[in-house]
Amino acid sequence: MSRKVLVLAEVRDNSLRNVSFETIAAGKTVAEGGEVVAVLLGLGVKGLSDQLFHYGADRVKVVEHDKLKAYTPDGYSQALLTVINEEKPDGIIIGHTALGKDLAPKLAAKLQAGLISDVTEIDEAGGNIVFTRPIYSGKAFEKKIITEGIIFATIRPNNISPLDPDDSLTGEVSVVDIDIKDLRTIVKEVVRKAAVGVDLSEAKVVIAGGRGVKSSEGFEPLKELANVLGGAIGASRGACDADYCDYSLQIGQTGKVVTPDLYIACGISGAIQHLAGMSNSKVIVAINKDPEANIFKVADYGIVGDLFEVVPLLTEEFKKLKVHS
């Protein structure tokens, strides 16, 4: 059964986030041969349309407005609802990001639609689209289908692989004019902490530190390893509570959920709250002096040792591999 599926392309700093391409791939699965329509919201974002076509979008709808320059739930929901009412899609896919987690429930309520959140896998079985999502802090998974009404889901970044890009693909771009009004929240200025490197929530490699790093300076060897591997730095809540790093790096039940290809846990004991945020990583490497640390129970590879000795050794070995590759 072919369907029309609407996907939200998420923009940050005038660039498309990788989850935008993942939503297109998810949309293709749900569409089952039907049409995938990507939606761009913002200001000065029309030029990003070509990338969405390259990754498989059939059409692109663009809504540009001064009040969409920064995300607000009222502004984005008004814009997206306008497109939804025009297109009348059979399905909607949004990334399970900070933006998506805020926006999707609001839209679902307005559409009176069911919402399947934090999806990690999408399959077709018996004529139904089956969504898999983690429950109980990742200790179990459930499979869900939507039997009637619009199919609405958010997908966890780094779990559904984007399609291989094809620069020859193109399509129709249409601009939607709307009057956004009655905003309860107005963003006057966005102040960001100075940050460099890879976005933690989309990183393919994450190097995370816990209380075992002992200080903010203890993160320096981890940062060097992350730079060599092209990865991002994360932290346990213990490290954040100890003021070794900012809470924006926190991974866990009350922090970010990450699913990189490689997760290296340095000096992290493995509290259940932390495991909830990283246990679905494809390969987990744990470095800890305590051989009984809980982190070793979920690790694919474990190194019992002092992280300040082990991490520099790993960094040097990876540097050698990069030179010879």
Image: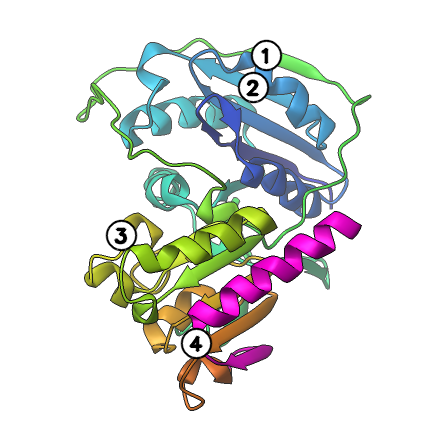
Which amino acid is tagged 4? Asp
- The residue tagged 3 is 247
Q: N-terminal of the two: label 1 or label 3? A: 1
Residue drawn at 66 percent across, 47 percent down: 30
Q: N-terminal of the two: label 4 or label 2? A: 2
Report the magenta residues as a range. 298-325
- Measuring from the top left, give residue 233's x and y in whole percent: 43, 52
Q: Is residue 175 magenta?
A: no
Tell me how the rendering is colored.
Answer: rainbow
Q: Are marks 1 and 2 in contact (CB under 8 Å)?
A: yes
Q: Is residue 30 above or below residue 34?
A: below
Q: Nearer the viewer, mark 2 or mark 3?
A: 3
Residue drawn at 52 percent across, 55 percent down: 225
Residue 306 tag number? 4
Q: N-terminal of the two: label 1 or label 2? A: 2
Q: Are marks 4 and 1 in contact (CB under 8 Å)?
A: no
Of the pair 143 and 260, the residue shown nearer to us: 260
- The residue tagged 1 is 174
Left or right, 128 with reference to 182: right
Q: N-terminal of the two: label 2 or label 3? A: 2
Residue 130 visible in the current orientation: no
Q: CA distance from mark 2 to mark 3?
A: 36 Å
- Measuring from the top left, give residue 152's x and y in whole percent: 50, 46
Which amino acid is tagged 3? Tyr
- Measuring from the top left, give residue 159's x and y in whole percent: 59, 55
